[in-house]
């Protein structure tokens, strides 16, 4: 069995330490003999679970030192699960420790099966709480938008700033990145949130029908027009109109849409009366509109009208570990929808998701999770359930402790500064606010030899 988690054993009895070393073979165990060494190991190892003998030196016959250690551990690492260990006649002391924040208590003599079970339960709870904290962080200020990567947080903050204005927004990004989710979030945070949100995909409707869908038509205006039909623009009155794939709109309709955006009036097909319409317009496209303007397949004046503010929605491959946060969100949703007992992902599944390049972006991920929830036979989805057993070059694995988070963040910052400084170490050090020798020391520390080789 692979090691399941980090455990710190605090006990001054070398015999107990030896006994636990052989009993806790399924865990990555570190030992400490007193309060100072326990705190030192806590900072160094960052364990998920601590077993703490309350009788520590310099007064092992009294629980005072152990209780001080408990309070200090929980102060420094409040999410750590502490299992206090006491003698047979110290039940009240153990209960006092639980009141102070200990996860559980255990009375000597040591029983291998019981202590393994206690630690296993504590580790499971610690992992669950970690996932819940991650999911809490994943929710941006825009509600629907899940993620905590710099790319998605930046886009979300930009959307939040302009949500309560009537400025026209153009959402740019690859297919499947969640442009409609952004549009709906903007609408829900606007002054129009209680009015309609009307979406239309300009690429999915034939050209000869798109004009009628947008502007409506009068009865008898063309063959088959047996009644007057109100178009999507008029239906969105007082609310938000979302025009997805605006880059696929035919040139002929672009002129009519431009007039509406400028004058805020429409005419139905076959109609003679101008109809005032008060709507907020959000457009989206995966196309390169500036290039389309150059080759004259998209009107330049319309481009500037629909894109008073442009927001780039990043592809999933550029969103760091958001893929895992999104996957857990989808898993919880589909597990409830399909009444499935699936409750998480195996480490192999997480690694496979991080290694995959996600050409279909969030839409591809969502489909993978939906089918995996249906197909999974156990409590955890694995890489086979996701059909991701053959993945591309590995990305960094999801980290589960603050030290690794800090190291990864510093490594990324160093690489970013290095490239921003055009491979000039002195400029990179200046950007990072450190000296050149310190920068070289950090490069050595994080094994970024490729940076040194390029200088």
Image (cartoon, rainbow, N blue to C red):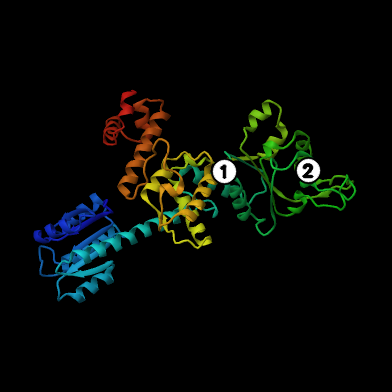
Q: Which mark is residue 209?
A: 2
> Rounded to the nearest whole Å, what is the CA distance between mark 1 and mark 2?
25 Å
Total label count?
Answer: 2
Q: Position of residue 248 (x, y in %)?
A: 69, 36
Q: Quadrant of the C terminus?
A: top left
Does residue 148 appear in the picture of this structure?
A: no
Residue, x 24% and y 74% (percent of image)?
95
Q: Position of residue 276 (x, y in %)?
A: 81, 50
Residue, x 10% and y 69% (percent of image)?
61
N-term-proximal mark, 1 vs 2: 1
Q: Is residue 152 left or right of residue 427?
A: right
Q: Is residue 444 left or right of residue 191?
A: left
Q: Nearer the viewer, residue 248 or 143?
A: 248
Q: Secondary structure at mark 1?
A: loop
Q: Quadrant of residue 66?
A: bottom left
Residue indicated by mark 1: 176
Q: Please, is residue 316 above or below residue 135 in the view?
A: above
Instruction: Count residues near mark 1 (Cα–Cα under 10 Å), then give few for <14, some for 14-19, many for 20+.
Output: many
Q: Nearer the viewer, residue 139 or 381?
A: 381
């Amino acid at each position: 069995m692979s090691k399941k988690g980090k455990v710190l054993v605090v006990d001054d009895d070398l015999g107990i330490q030896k006994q636990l070393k052989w009993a806790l073979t399924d865990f990555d165990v570190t030992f400490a003999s007193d309060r100072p060494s326990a705190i030192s190991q806590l900072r160094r190892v960052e364990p998920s679970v601590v077993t703490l003998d309350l009788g520590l030196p310099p007064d092992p016959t009294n629980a005072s030192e152990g209780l001080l250690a408990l309070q200090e551990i929980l102060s420094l690492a409040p999410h750590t699960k502490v299992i206090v260990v006491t003698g047979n006649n110290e039940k009240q002391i153990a209960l006092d420790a639980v009141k102070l924040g200990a996860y559980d208590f255990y009375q000597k003599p040591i029983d291998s099966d019981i202590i393994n079970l206690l630690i296993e339960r504590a580790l499971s709870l610690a992992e669950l709480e970690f996932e819940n904290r991650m999911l809490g962080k994943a929710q941006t200020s825009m509600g629907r938008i899940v993620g905590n990567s710099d790319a998605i947080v930046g886009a979300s903050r930009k959307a939040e700033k302009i949500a309560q204005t009537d400025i026209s927004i153009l959402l740019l990004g690859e297919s499947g990145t969640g442009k409609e989710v952004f549009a709906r979030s903007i609408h829900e945070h606007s002054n129009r949130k209680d009015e309609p949100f009307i979406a239309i995909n300009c690429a999915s409707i034939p050209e000869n029908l798109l004009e009628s869908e947008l502007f409506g038509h009068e009865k008898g205006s063309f063959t088959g027009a047996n009644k007057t039909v109100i178009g999507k623009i008029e239906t969105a009155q007082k609310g938000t109109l979302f025009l997805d794939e605006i880059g696929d709109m035919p040139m002929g309709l672009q002129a009519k849409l431009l007039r509406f955006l400028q004058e805020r009036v429409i005419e139905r097909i076959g109609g003679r009366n101008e109809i005032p319409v008060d709507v907020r317009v959000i457009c989206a496209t995966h196309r390169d509109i500036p290039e389309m303007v150059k080759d004259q397949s998209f009107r330049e004046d319309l481009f500037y009208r629909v894109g008073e503010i442009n927001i780039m929605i990043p592809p999933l491959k550029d969103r760091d570990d958001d893929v895992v946060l999104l996957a857990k969100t989808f898993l919880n949703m589909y597990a409830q929808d399909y009444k499935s007992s699936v409750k998480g992902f195996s480490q192999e599944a997480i690694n496979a998701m991080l290694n995959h390049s996600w050409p279909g972006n969030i839409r591809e991920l969502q489909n993978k999770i939906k089918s995996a929830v249906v197909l999974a036979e156990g409590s955890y989805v694995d890489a086979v359930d996701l059909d991701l057993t053959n993945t591309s070059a590995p990305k960094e694995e999801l980290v589960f402790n603050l030290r690794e988070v800090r190291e990864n963040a510093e490594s990324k910052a160093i690489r970013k500064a290095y490239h921003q400084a055009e491979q000039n170490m002195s400029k990179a050090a200046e950007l990072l606010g450190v000296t050149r020798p310190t920068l070289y020391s950090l490069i050595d520390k994080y094994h970024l030899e490729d940076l040194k080789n390029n200088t």
